[in-house]
Image (spheres, rainbow, N blue to C red):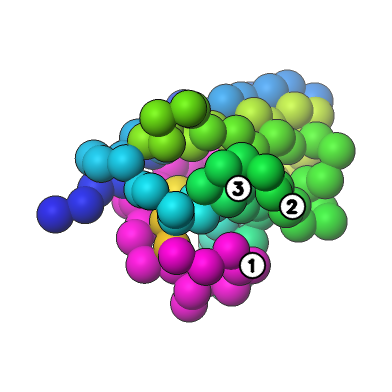
């Protein structure tokens, strides 16, 4: 069974930084990996994705210029570096993997359990 395990969440003040990691139980050859987030009372929303080769990264407008997604050369770990955090970034962040590069959650097959990020003003 494939597992994705997120880590690195926590509580920070506005303007601070966090780095999320997502470790996969196997290499997702040719898969796109991404991050989504869900705030209380809101729908899950796209944050960023990175293709298998790392040649394409796409970000939500709300995080562009502040967040950076990357993956290791083996393809089993994906990272989300989050800088200049804002209270609006408070959410549970989910790691995901799928065969299509997409901003739509339905196109992703595997999901982690999520890690909480809380940003205080």
Q: Quadrant of the C terminus?
A: top right
Is 72 or 87 nearer to us in this picture? 72
- Residue at 70% from the left image edge and 35% from the top image edge: 68
Answer whether labels 1 and 2 touch (C-beta < 8 Å): no
Q: Nearer the viewer, mark 2 or mark 3?
A: 3
Q: Which mark is residue 59?
A: 2
Residue 98 seen anywhere in this rendered image of the structure: yes
> Can residue 116 be found in the magenta stretch?
yes
**Distance between the alpha carbons at the discs numbered 3 and 1:** 11 Å
Q: Earlier in the sequence, mark 2 or mark 3?
A: 3
Residue 88 seen anywhere in this rendered image of the structure: no
State whether residue 62 is above or below residue 18.
Answer: below
**Distance between the alpha carbons at the discs numbered 1 and 2:** 9 Å
- Residue at 81% from the left image edge and 53% from the top image edge: 62
State whether residue 32 is above or below residue 14.
Answer: below
Residue 54 pos. (x, y %): 61, 41
| Label 2 Cα neighbours within 10 Å, binned few <14 / some 14-19 / many ≥20 | many
- Residue range (magenta): 99-121
| Label 3 Cα neighbours within 10 Å, binned few <14 / some 14-19 / many ≥20 | many
Residue ID for mark 1: 103
How many numbered marks are there? 3
Is 111 or 85 nearer to us in this picture? 111
Q: Quadrant of the N terminus?
A: bottom left
**Distance between the alpha carbons at the discs numbered 2 and 3:** 9 Å
- Residue at 63% from the left image edge and 61% from the top image edge: 46
Q: Earlier in the sequence, mark 3 or mark 1?
A: 3
Element on which disc 2 rests: strand
Residue 112 pos. (x, y %): 35, 51
Q: Which mark is residue 50?
A: 3
Q: Earlier in the sequence, mark 1 or mark 2?
A: 2
> Can residue 58 be found in the magenta stretch?
no
Residue 19 pos. (x, y %): 57, 26
């Amino acid at each position: 069974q494939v597992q994705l395990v997120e880590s690195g969440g926590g509580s920070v003040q506005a303007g601070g930084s966090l780095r999320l990691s997502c470790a996969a139980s196997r290499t997702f050859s040719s898969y796109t990996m991404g991050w989504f987030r869900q705030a209380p009372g809101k729908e899950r929303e796209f944050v960023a994705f990175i293709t298998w080769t790392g040649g394409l990264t796409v970000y939500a407008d709300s995080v562009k210029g502040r967040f950076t997604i990357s993956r290791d050369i083996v393809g089993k770990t994906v990272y989300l570096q989050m800088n200049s955090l804002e209270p609006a970034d408070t959410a549970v962040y989910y790691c995901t993997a799928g065969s299509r590069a997409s901003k739509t959650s339905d196109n992703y097959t595997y999901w982690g359990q999520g890690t909480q990020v809380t940003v205080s003003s």
